[in-house]
Amino acid sequence: MSEHVGAIDLGTTGVRCVVFDRGARPVASAYRELPLSFPRPGWVEQDPQAMVSATLAVMGEAVGRAGGGDTLAAMGITNQRETVVVWDRATGRPLHRAIVWQDRRTAARCAELRAAGAERWVRERTGLPLDPYFSATKLSWLLDHVPGLRGKPERGTVLCGTVDSWLLWNLCGVHATDDTNASRTQLYDIRGGRWDPELLDLFGVPAGCLPEVRPSLFRYGEARRDLFGEAFPVAGILGDQQAALFGQAVFEPGGGKVTWGTGAFLLQNVGTNPVRSRHGLLTTVAYTREGSDPCYALEGSVFVAGAAIQWLRDGLGILDDAAGSEILATSVRSNEGVYFVPALTGLGAPHWDPYARGAILGLTRGTTRAHLVRAALEAIAYQTHDVVRAMEADAGVSLPELRVDGGAARNDFLCQFQADILEIPVLRPAVLETTSLGAAFAAGLAVGFWSDLAAVRDLLPEPTRFVPTMSSAEREGRLDGWRRAVDRSRGWAEGTR
């Protein structure tokens, strides 16, 4: 009897597999880190084969601990979005390292397209601004720069896709993706629900190399029996931020969440009518089901959030582990005027400045590593604040509360500071791996493991609440310092090579 639903969360810095029971309680999990490479300033790449190997390893561990593949009703997939892979159809071998969503190598190409007047109509069809963050210019770069690659996609010998489609190909031999991931490529008409011929022509990406687009809640295929000894359905695919929204059970318009992972991503459910942003946000697909209208979301994407703490640990060596950041941050009474703008790969929403660079300002002889760590945590909250205010201006309503998840949400200092800076309650769920939970919900609903959206909403326990306590004067003073710091980081790398 099928007792469990599993979820693969193929992220930027690691891959996790979690197996849940019918009460949406995790019963087994496994995790592996994934390395990133930085071949040039602003370039970020990953090994596609390492993604698959690590995924198979954590699936084997988690499924084994849960009792084996025959206990699984389905396995869902959630993934880092915008990252692209190209591979040979016949051999299944990747033809280049994956270009990661953080990569900025196509900033000049995006600037050329903006200068040519393409921005307005591209945003109208895709909900996205012209920025190297998205997949289209990455795919175009690969087709132009990998020797011998241009021409092969037209002949059907090369396949392209985001990492969900790369993983699905390796698990099931199916070349497909879902609407949420397709909506992040800048090749997909979010209203028409299809790859757009004019966008494909603009970016020089042939339709024949792209995956078939299917609903998010869908049975995609069967995992190969030789992988785990049992063939179980792979059902339900969501981009990681849409999966977190789904895992927080934000099924009705008006609700919002932020995921603090490598980056920070705030999504607000806006229902079945896509809202066009006037304040630097994205319009994206939240999820789709067969026979129903798509559900859309407004999104603000911050490129570096938890990755700033990781950089302090790995790049500067001033932290032993990320968990120690809260102890250091609370060891000092304030930031003492130190601000960290973590524009290490440019600024995302609402600024969209690929030429911004990281800056630490306000240093004195009295500055310690504790002040730097505190400034990095505060920067996560400041960036989230900026996106929330832009989102409220677009939607015309104020968020009554903000749901948080992701690894950094374990940090009580950050949750409290966020409530103080936003002046609204912050809600932290009992299960922080809401990205995995969202993929599991999608998979379970797709195969009938759970009956409907109301049934999965009822499974979530009460969250922990953080309520604001900071005075208005202190709040405005801190935000003023943050705004001045952001101004100094903007445009820093413009005109450099």
Image (cartoon, grey):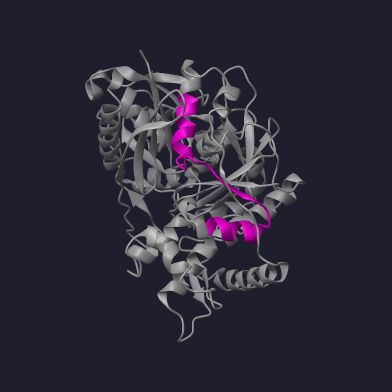
Q: Relative to 25, is 289 on the left or the right?
A: right
Q: Relative to 288, is 316 on the left or the right?
A: left
Q: Which residues make up the magenta segment?
A: 414-443
Which quadrant holds the N terminus? top left
Q: Is residue 150 above or below residue 109?
A: above
User: Quadrant location of residue 379?
Assistant: bottom right
Mainly helix, strand or loop, the magenta region? helix
Which quadrant holds the C terminus? bottom left
Residue 303, how many percent across, how many down? 50, 55
Q: Relative to 255, is 463 on the left or the right?
A: left
Determine if residue 401 is in view: yes
Residue 226, how many percent across, how many down? 22, 21
Determine if residue 41 is in view: no
Q: Residue furthest right?
A: 396
For the residue pair 47 and 33, the one nearer the viewer reads as: 33
Residue 294, how many percent across, how many down? 62, 27
Q: Residue furthest bottom?
A: 365
Is-magenta flag for residue 420?
Answer: yes
Report the number of numbered marks.
Answer: 0
Q: Residue at x 24, y 23 (%)?
A: 228
